[in-house]
Amino acid sequence: MSVIHLQALDKVREKDWNGAHQLIQQYNDPMACLIHGYLHRIEGDMSNAAYWYNRGHEVVPANSLDDELERLYALASQE
């Protein structure tokens, strides 16, 4: 699954929000939910972001979007 996670995060780095969202929304594992929540943070939809982070067993972090992207990359790389 980490390949899908990393592909979605790569799309984020490429500024392809729609592509990342289309790819990740098919999955419901905790990491996919965190990425999905992150995508909604980027979008500015914080209630939807909170929903997805909760499904990933976390709360929306207070870090920057850039810091969160790096954190998610690190997590996905450990899978």
Image: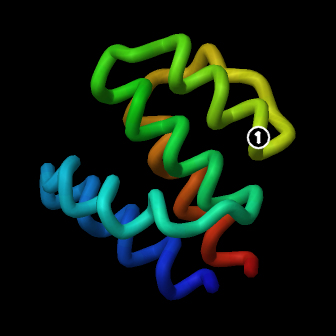
Residue 71 percent coordinates (x, y):
60, 49
Colour treatment of the image: rainbow
Which residue is pictured at 21% across the width and 62% down the height? Answer: 19
Quadrant (top left, top right, bottom left, bottom right) of the C terminus: bottom right
Which residue is pictured at 53% across the width and 50% down the height? Answer: 35
> Is 5 above or below relative to 15?
below
Amino acid type, residue under disc 1 in the picture: Arg
Residue 8 percent coordinates (x, y):
38, 67
Quadrant (top left, top right, bottom left, bottom right) of the N terminus: bottom right
Q: Secondary structure at mark 1?
A: helix
Would you identify the image quadrant in which residue 50 lies?
Answer: top right
Would you identify the image quadrant in which residue 63 lies?
Answer: top right
> Is 55 above or below relative to 51?
below
Residue 64 percent coordinates (x, y):
46, 23
Left or right: residue 40 compared with residue 55: left
Name the outermost residue toward the right.
57
> Is 33 above or below relative to 53?
below
Nearest to the observer: residue 76 or residue 40:
40
Residue 29 percent coordinates (x, y):
73, 64
Which residue is pictured at 27% across the width and 54% down the height? Answer: 12
